[in-house]
Image (spheres, coloured by chain):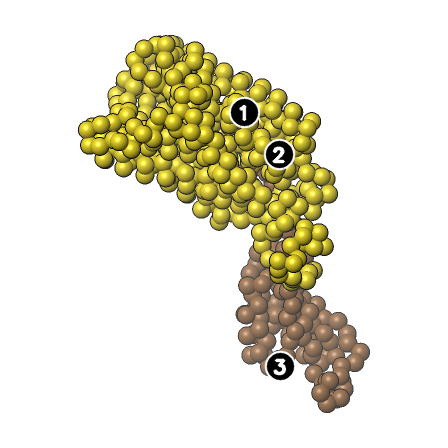
Chain colours: A brown, B yellow
Amino acid sequence: MKLVTAVIKPHKLDDVKNALEAFGIQGMTVSEASGYGRQRGHTEVYRGAEYTSDLVPKVRIEVLVDDTGAPDVLDVIVRASQTGRIGDGKVWASPVDEVVRVRTGERGVEAI
Amino acid sequence: MVDTGTTAWILTSASLVLLMTPALAMFYGGMNRHRGVLNMMMMSFGALGLVSVLWVLYGYSFAFGDSVGGLIGNPVQYLGLDGILQADAEMTGDEVAVGTYPTLAFVAFQAAFAIITVALISGAVADRAKFSTWMVFSGIWVSVVYFPVAHWVFAFQGEELDQGGWIGSRLGTIDLAGGTAVHINAGAAALALAVVLGRRKGFGKEPMRPNNLPLVMLGAGLLWFGWFGFNAASFLTADGVAAYVWVNTLVAPGAAMLGWLLVERLRDGASTSLGAASGVVAGLVAITPACGAVTPVGAILVGAIAGVVCAFAVGLKYKLGYDDALDVVGVHLVGGLVGTVLIAFFASAEATAYGQDGLLYGGGLDLLFKQTVPALAVLAYSFVVTLLIGLALKATMGFRVSAEAEAEGIDSAEHAESAYEFSGIGARAFSPRTSESTSKSEVSA
């Protein structure tokens, strides 16, 4: 099993959610996040004085999938969230040892 | 003969000018950091309460009593508006105290000028002045600086040269609505207070971004609205001259805004809303002395120059190291100087009111002298006297809140309030006051 985590631009959340639903993903966890990549935040100017904020608002999406589905889910998220401009974000998959559905106690792939 | 149209316009304009002080509170309040926005607004409202009372008690007499050597009005002539009330109350259609309107209408109009001039200074001392000391300062400053300077500039009593203030009435300086008395005066005082109080903790290092730019825009818009009364009623007429001044008060801020935005676009890469609001105010400041002396095209030039110059001037505080928090010096002192001195260049005899030509229209150097000397005199007088008042209060009452109060935020330290409810986290118990539990210790517990 894999945990796919995506950190994307907030305004792309709906596109990604719709794309994942269309692909057949049945659940996800979404949280607000902030951070920066190579672009290092943004600059604001007040009466000529510059203020730089490193941390830019982002959305983090987490999806549990079985091993074979992970590469496709990565592709779906990338396609739906890409604008081609700086700050589009990152998506990655990491191994998951065990998953338990709290309501039934089912384990592993059954619990996804 | 009382002219009801003139009276109506002066009283309406007095109300418009009075609105400028709450507008200034919004303009300044929005520019301040969130934890000091209420203190910022309270300094304007404090001036509103205090100066209105002092004006009636003795301020009007100091400013508009019979001149004592061109320096101050007879201080006891109109104490408590004595002598005006009876004349005005008895005034009917064909009896009148002064001109074609009740004297009290003029008292009201000028009261609003005194109030906003004091409030303007507060922008320099954001986030660190004790409110109690600010109020005492306001009372002393308006009495020994504003009232006399208003006399110098605004008191015209009769035709004879031994009457009236030395700047407006005797020297013949053109300053319609107070480039010297209001803006240079407040700006120089702001510089002096910034020096006396010292810099905010973290000035020049920590970000101190405005807490609410829409409030700044609203404040600037209402200032502009009130400013039409400020300028267009300053000839105390409701006629073609007033309309002329109104148009100049429209175009100068417009051009100044464009100038400021252009500087920002070229220098910083973006034209900002704070720049637009600041440009409008800079243009209004600059056209205030000049709006009766220049043509509308001249007003556009005065405004554009003020917008560009002030956009650069607000950066001076970082270079020179004084913490004029909300740029009273950069906008009001510099804008006031620009407007007052440019009259010597752009004045046109075609502009109805004064019939004088500036240098660009073939006038002589005489007007340059008349404009420059009083501007520098008011600057110097205001700076030095304010410095002395400030140092005296610093030595006696103390002028700054504690470092701890400053770090925690001046709103809660000085006013026991906060402007915005950000989150329930950290909220404390609520205990409504009853007659048994109103002691101060319980409130702060």
Residue B177 percent location from the top left of the image? 38, 27
Image position of B200 (left or right of B120): right
Q: Label 3 crowding class (10 Å Cα cut-off): few <14, some 14-19, many 20+?
A: few
Q: Is residue B431 above or below residue A40?
A: below
Q: Are marks 1 and 2 in contact (CB under 8 Å)?
A: no
- In the rendered structure, which disc, 1 or 2, sits on the residue that comes first in sequence? 2
Q: Label 2 crowding class (10 Å Cα cut-off): few <14, some 14-19, many 20+?
A: some
Chain name for mark 2: B
In the picture, the quarter occupied by the C terminus of chain B is: bottom right
Question: Mark 2 falls on what kind of element?
Answer: helix
Chain name for mark 1: B
Query: Picture quarter containing residue B307?
Result: top left
**At 71% from the left edge and 51% from the top edge, which residue is drawn?**
B441
Q: Label 1 crowding class (10 Å Cα cut-off): few <14, some 14-19, many 20+?
A: many
Q: Amino acid at mark 1?
A: Ala
Q: Which mark is residue B188?
A: 1
State whether residue B339 appears in this view.
no
Residue A30 percent location from the top left of the image? 64, 70
Question: In this view of the protein, which residue sits in the foreground, A81 or B41?
Answer: B41
Question: In this view of the protein, which residue sits in the foreground, B10 or B59?
Answer: B59
Question: Mark 1 falls on what kind of element?
Answer: helix
**Foreground mark, 3 or 2?**
2
What whole-number distance in Å separates the C-alpha atoms at marks 1 and 2?
19 Å
What residue would you read off at disc 2? B133
Q: Is residue A57 above or below residue B292?
A: below
Q: Amino acid at mark 2?
A: Thr
In the picture, the quarter occupied by the N terminus of chain B is: top left
